[in-house]
Amino acid sequence: MANRILIVEDEIDLARTLEYSLNKDGYDTICAATGKVALEHARQEPIPDLILLDLMLPDMSGLEVCRHVRSHPATQNVSILILTAKGEEIDRVVGFELGADDYVVKPFSIRELKLRIGAILRRQGGKGGVKPVSDNLIPINRTTQSIVVAGEEISLTSLEFRILDALTANPGQFMSRDELLKQVWGEKSGVRSRTVDVHVNRLREKLGPSNQLIETRRNVGYRYNQPKTNF
Ligand code: CA
């Protein structure tokens, strides 16, 4: 099935251009010009795979939309790509803290935007296959971007997934927040290390009874501790 993208943008010309261009690439699209309509569309089946989210909307801020998307069970794992105007630097950072996956700064090229969209959806889709449990690692399903904790499948956001991926790649070794930041968000993301904590904490919450697998050490960073027994 085609990936479904919700375009949240009140500049009608831009919304139409995006829609046309994404349709041409085979994406299924739906548009919303206000935050209210965006949230309605986001929660309707089929749930979108990705939301392109303008920050300056007539009825509410895109960040508020972001927060609602993340807090609703039906949409909490939907990827969000923020469209931000120049000078909205602070909002962009807050966007990451609220769980956005990526951003582009207006005016952006459609080509650049499509590359970002493709990258997010690829991460969502992954390469398929479940890491073998005998690795002594948390079973990670790359196809559904989820983990299995105590026999239950729990889906992760792209960022949470990448954090887990980075940590489990070097079990037992501490990664500083800066290292994680570089690896997960990229070299020039402008994201503060506090954001790393926010996402790691969310990931730990999802790990539930297994959250001790990710250890936090003040002023050092995070590490993934291999479980002591096979499961
Ligand atoms: Ca706008």
Image (cartoon, rainbow, N blue to C red):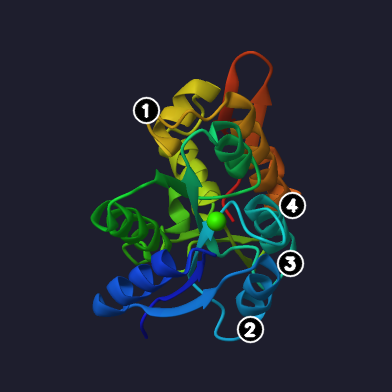
Residue 132 x/y as whole percent: 42, 58
Say few, some or many: other residues with alpha carbon within 10 Å of mark 2 (under 14 / 14 to 19 / 20 or more).
few
What amino acid does circle 1 point to?
Glu
State which tag comes first along the sequence, 2 or 1. 2
Residue at left 34%, top 67%? 128
Return the residue nearer the eye: 188 or 14: 14
Residue at left 36%, top 47%? 107
Instruction: Find out whether the residues at labels 1 and 3 contact each other: C-beta distance under 8 Å.
Output: no
Q: Which label was assigned to residue 147?
A: none
Return the residue nearer the eye: 170 or 109: 109
Which residue bears the numbered disc 2? 44
Which residue bears the numbered disc 3? 72
User: Left or right: 55 with respect to 161?
Assistant: right
Residue 174 visible in the picture: no
Residue 33 x/y as whole percent: 58, 70
The secondary structure type at the circle numbered 3 is: loop
Return the residue nearer the eye: 42 or 71: 42
Residue 130 x/y as whole percent: 41, 64
What amino acid does circle 2 point to?
Gln
The secondary structure type at the circle numbered 4 is: helix
Residue 51 visible in the picture: yes
What is the spatial separation of the Cα atoms under label 1 and label 3, in whole angstroms?
A: 31 Å
What is the spatial separation of the Cα atoms under label 1 and label 4, in whole angstroms?
A: 31 Å
Which residue bears the numbered disc 1? 187
Answer with the quarter of the image where residue 43 lies: bottom right
